[in-house]
Image (cartoon, rainbow, N blue to C red):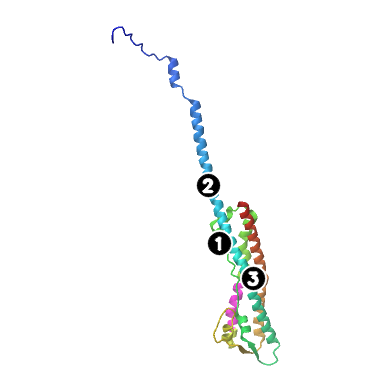
Amino acid sequence: MGKGAKPKRPLRYTDRNMNQSRRIPWNRLAAEGFVVVVSILLAFAIDAWWDSHLDDRREDRQLAAMREEFSASSAAIDEVLEDIEQHANGVEELISLLKSAESDSVQVPGPLLGYAIGWRTSDVSTSTLETVIASGDLNQLENEDLRRDLAGFPAFLLNLTEDELMAMEFAESTMASFLAREGLAETAYSNRPGFDWPGASETATVVPSDEFIGLLMARRVHFGFSLDQLPLVRTYLEDLIAQIDAELEIEG
């Protein structure tokens, strides 16, 4: 230490100094903690919103896919109805021809025998709907009416599909066996609607019988059921399409 220099006074920490140095900045920590909590909550909220957004987009895609499927099925029903009505009229004409026969045999046009063994299914597609149901996504649909109607459609359609299967089996088994026994199978199959058989027989000699007429009347019942049920299925489909359109418009 040089001459004339005053000695430095040692620092003394009083109790007051110690308390100030050890004081915890509660206000600052509280503010920082608040920011952290808000940031976490905001992150959770954003994640939840994004998940909900993705769910809504998936639901919209599923609804749009079902609408497309239902629309195609509804449009196809018109063609199916026309074909079934043609089958029913052909069978009715054959019944009348056999009932009015004045001899032991009658010449029957080949196409009429073709209608006796022909059949046509509605082919209403529900693959997209069944996938949505199986995945559990249908349960997430908030529109209760639409959810209920979508869930109920496969069961509603089952009555038609079961009868169509029965009609097909009847044609391919019972009716086919009878026609084969009577020597009429070749003419019937070669004239079946929807099949282009070269050299199909134009007519066949048929012996009228109560058995044949009874089988034809059973076929007429099958066709009648389809003609009754298909318009109801189309109405159901059109209602589903309208509900889906309304739902997509609301969400859009």
The secondary element bearing badge 2 is classed as helix
Dominant SS of magenta comes to helix
Disc 3 residue type?
Answer: Asp
Q: Is residue 190 magenta?
A: no
* Percent of width and height locating residue 216: 65, 81
The secondary element bearing badge 3 is classed as helix
Q: Is residue 169 magenta?
A: yes
* Percent of width and height locating residue 83: 63, 75
Per the rendering, the mark at residue 50 is 2
In the shown orientation, is residue 206 left or right of residue 22?
right
Q: CA distance from mark 1 to mark 3?
A: 22 Å
Crowd class of label 2 (few under 14; some 14 to 19; many from 20; radius 10 Å) = few
Q: Residue at x 60, y 63 (%)?
A: 70
Crowd class of label 1 (few under 14; some 14 to 19; many from 20; radius 10 Å) = some
Please state which of the two labelled residues, at mark 1 or mark 3, is closer to the viewer.
Answer: 3
Crowd class of label 3 (few under 14; some 14 to 19; many from 20; radius 10 Å) = some
Circle 3 is placed at which residue position? 78
Q: Residue at x 45, y 15 (%)?
A: 16
Q: CA distance from mark 2 to mark 1?
A: 25 Å
Q: Residue at x 50, y 37 (%)?
A: 39
Residue 187 position by quadrant: bottom right
The secondary element bearing badge 1 is classed as helix
Disc 2 residue type?
Answer: Trp
Task: Write down the region rendered in magenta.
Answer: 164-177
